[in-house]
Image: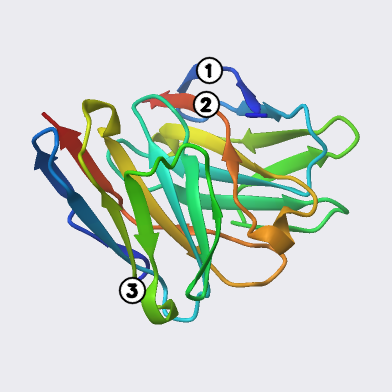
Amino acid sequence: QQPVQSPQAVILREGEDAVINCSSSKALYSVHWYRQKHGEAPVFLMILLKGGEQKGHEKISASFNEKKQQSSLYLTASQLSYSGTYFCGTEIPGSYNQGGKLIFGQGTELSVKP
Amino acid sequence: DTGVSQNPRHKITKRGQNVTFRCDPISEHNRLYWYRQTLGQGPEFLTYFQNEAQLEKSRLLSDRFSAERPKGSFSTLEIQRTEQGDSAMYLCASSTRDHYNEQFFGPGTRLTVL
């Protein structure tokens, strides 16, 4: 039930790009992306809904393939501040009316070096 | 809007003691979630409130755990007879009832059971 993220970890130089993937075995209503720095709360990045709606920060881009139950987060021209652990959280259809709990992946640790 | 706040930020307790954590959500948010996060893992759903009603509880939430949200405002999470396995970060999140269900997380309470 827990979505699977890949890769587990990635190291970048400043300015390089990265893609983080999230794959679910269940049909999804939405995918939420968060970044968490050590000892801090997860910070919202992006929501992608079934049907194509999106909401998120301007500098963040992501995709959601509903048929494959997969989402990808695209980090371009990385900065030192992008370092942290990225989590995807998934909602299954119908869960919104029942509360909308998120099921999180295990995380992808991103390190950006100067 | 001061965001979601949680108190205390850190709690160290001896096994067998009871502990209580508090979460103050964003004022206009009627949905409130509790998650638990252990090192190297994504947050795991514990329970959910819509206003003052507790509508869903995870099977992870044993009888030693209880949560309340009196008057639909702040929420408390109590753990009775703590065990070492309860050591984790306890995160609170809140959201509105819009279809995005963007969840804003608090800074968490880190519990250490000795």
**Figure check: A82 above or below A93:** above
User: Decide: marks 2, 1 in contact (CB < 8 A)?
Assistant: yes
**Figure check: B81 above or below A106:** below
Q: Chain of mark 2?
A: A
* SS category of the residue bearing label 1: loop
Q: Nearer the viewer, mark 2 or mark 1?
A: 2
The answer to whether any part of residue A9 appears in the image is yes
Mark 2 to mark 1 CA distance (whole Å): 8 Å
Question: Left or right of A29: which side holds A83?
Answer: left
Percent x, y of residue B76: 31, 63
Which label belongs to residue A8?
Answer: 1
| Rendered residue at 23%/46% (across/down) | B80
| Rendered residue at 21%/27% (across/down) | B84
| Rendered residue at 60%/51% (across/down) | A101
Percent x, y of residue A109: 45, 25
**Figure check: A60 above or below B51:** above
Q: Amino acid at mark 2?
A: Gln
**Figure check: B56 above or below B80:** below
Q: Amino acid at mark 1?
A: Gln
Percent x, y of residue B106: 36, 57
User: Decide: marks 2, 3 in contact (CB < 8 A)?
Assistant: no
